Image (cartoon, coloured by chain):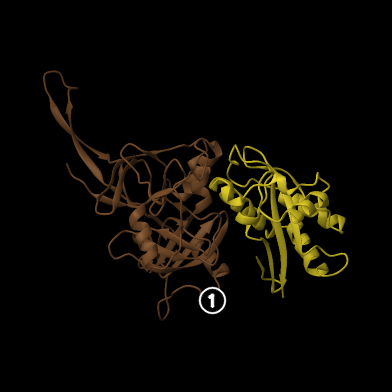
């Protein structure tokens, strides 16, 4: 996404979303990172035994993860007050003690109609930014229904790249 | 019976898209003709993404002879460049800076067969279909690939659907909409007058539409160095709306002409 008014390139993206997206029972990253994700989110720790090979995931799961990634990118780059405020926080505080982490794992639960039921991620150090990100990621419909057999939540690992 | 081939690109008024392009288009991002150019006409169709790099397929008759090309999706308008026009088939390759949504998945080996249910629609008609969320199909395969690289389907697609993907039940692209096989003139017996029988001629729009086959579309993309994803496995749930997948991969394409 490009913020032309400030000449700052801000990129919010999922790292290889189709490969690194995580579902319960689906092994897509090393076990240690999976445990870190579970504890960081305040959820039950996961273990290697709970995961499967990502190549065995149905294609429809990967397609749906890509779609969710695209929607999250679109919503966070939208030219409206909440998204603008969140991006400003990231730009101003990135790399500082009170700034956002370089990577963030977002857990997302989606309703059968494609709307985002809820999201969960390790709390940001700025309460307003934390609230804003929750608002942004829950604000719309991804456009397709999740595959009915797909395990939820989707676990999407994002990185924040700030290019000036 | 008179049969006329009708392309499904829709003529439009030029002003709104020209204004949008003037605001959003990066300098030098699209091919332009030399000297001053005045846009007086425009036509539109549908295009769909074929990779994650912003490449799109559409119908050649939508993208040829354009001063500029614009792609619009969900309120965003971006300039596009024409990468290639097929010399044999009604198909063209476009490029925009970034894929908006999902890219299409092509079948690896499965092909459409007669009576297979398909889905195809102009991008602009998709919102009303996705609101309902239950569109499983709106077209039927009549013949598959026997017409020089074209798939014949029965469909009620309208103007603006040129270049739209033809999706099968797995969500795989089985064709690219080209045009309708025009009007059919029927002779109908008129018995309204007692004792007399006259014949009326009625022009009926054919519901037969030609689409470039997936095999030929894949060959065209390969010839232009485009890497696509091929998979015979279902990409959507069998009970999911095809209109929603079409909306995820499609966009409106507008060609500005002088």
Quarter the C terminus of chain A occupies: bottom right
Q: Secondary structure at mark 1?
A: loop
| A75 or B232: nearer the viewer | B232
Q: Crowdedness of circle 1 by 10 Å Cα count: few (<14), some, many (20+)?
A: few
What's the chain of the residue with tag 1?
B
What hue represents chain A? yellow
- Residue drawn at (36%, 67%), measured in percent from left and top? B223
- Check the image and report above or below for A84 versus B143: below
Q: Is residue B181 left or right of residue A105?
A: left
Left or right of B143? Residue B63 is right
Can residue B19 be seen in this snapshot? no
User: Closer to the camera, A84 or B118?
Assistant: B118
Chain brown in the figure, letter: B
Whole-percent x, y for residue A88 in the image? 78, 65
Relative image position of residue A80 (x, y in whole percent): 71, 57
Disc 1 target residue: B27
């Amino acid at each position: 996404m490009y913020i032309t008014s400030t000449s700052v390139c801000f990129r919010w993206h999922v790292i290889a979303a189709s490969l690194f997206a995580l579902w319960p029972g689906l092994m897509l990253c090393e076990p240690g990172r999976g445990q870190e994700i579970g504890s960081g989110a305040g959820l039950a720790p996961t273990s290697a035994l709970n995961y499967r090979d990502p190549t065995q995931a149905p294609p429809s799961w990967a397609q749906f993860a890509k779609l969710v990634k695209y929607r999250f990118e679109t919503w966070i780059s939208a030219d409206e007050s909440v998204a603008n405020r969140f991006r400003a926080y990231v730009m101003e505080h990135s790399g500082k003690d009170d700034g956002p982490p370089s990577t963030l794992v977002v857990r997302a639960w989606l309703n059968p109609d494609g709307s985002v039921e809820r999201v969960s991620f390790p709390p940001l150090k700025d309460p307003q930014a934390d609230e804003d990100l929750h608002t942004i990621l829950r604000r719309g419909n991804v456009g397709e229904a999740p595959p009915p057999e797909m395990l939820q939540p989707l676990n999407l690992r994002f990185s924040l790249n700030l290019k000036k | 019976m008179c049969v006329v081939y009708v392309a499904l690109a829709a003529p439009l008024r030029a002003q709104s898209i020209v204004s949008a392009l003037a605001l959003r288009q990066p300098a030098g991002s699209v091919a332009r003709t030399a000297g001053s150019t005045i846009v007086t006409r425009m036509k539109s169709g549908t295009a769909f993404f074929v990779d994650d790099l912003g490449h799109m397929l559409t119908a050649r008759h939508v993208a040829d002879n354009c001063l500029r090309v614009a792609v619009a999706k969900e309120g965003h308008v971006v300039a596009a460049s024409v990468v290639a026009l097929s010399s044999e088939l009604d198909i063209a390759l476009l490029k925009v800076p970034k894929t908006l949504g999902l890219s299409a998945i092509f079948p690896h080996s499965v092909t459409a067969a007669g009576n297979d249910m398909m889905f195809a629609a102009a991008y602009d008609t998709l919102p009303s279909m996705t609101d309902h969320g239950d569109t499983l199909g709106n077209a039927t395969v009549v013949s598959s690939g026997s017409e020089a690289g074209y798939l014949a389907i029965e469909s009620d697609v309208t103007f603006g659907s040129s270049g739209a993907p033809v999706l099968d039940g797995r969500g795989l692209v089985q064709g690219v909409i080209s045009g309708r096989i025009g009007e059919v003139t029927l002779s109908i017996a008129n018995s309204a007058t007692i004792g007399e029988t006259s014949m009326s001629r009625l022009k009926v729009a054919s519901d037969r539409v030609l689409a470039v086959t997936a095999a030929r579309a894949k060959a065209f993309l390969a010839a232009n160095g485009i890497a696509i994803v091929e998979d015979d496995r279902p990409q959507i749930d069998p009970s999911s709306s095809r209109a929603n997948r079409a909306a995820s991969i499609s966009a409106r394409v507008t060609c500005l002409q002088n």
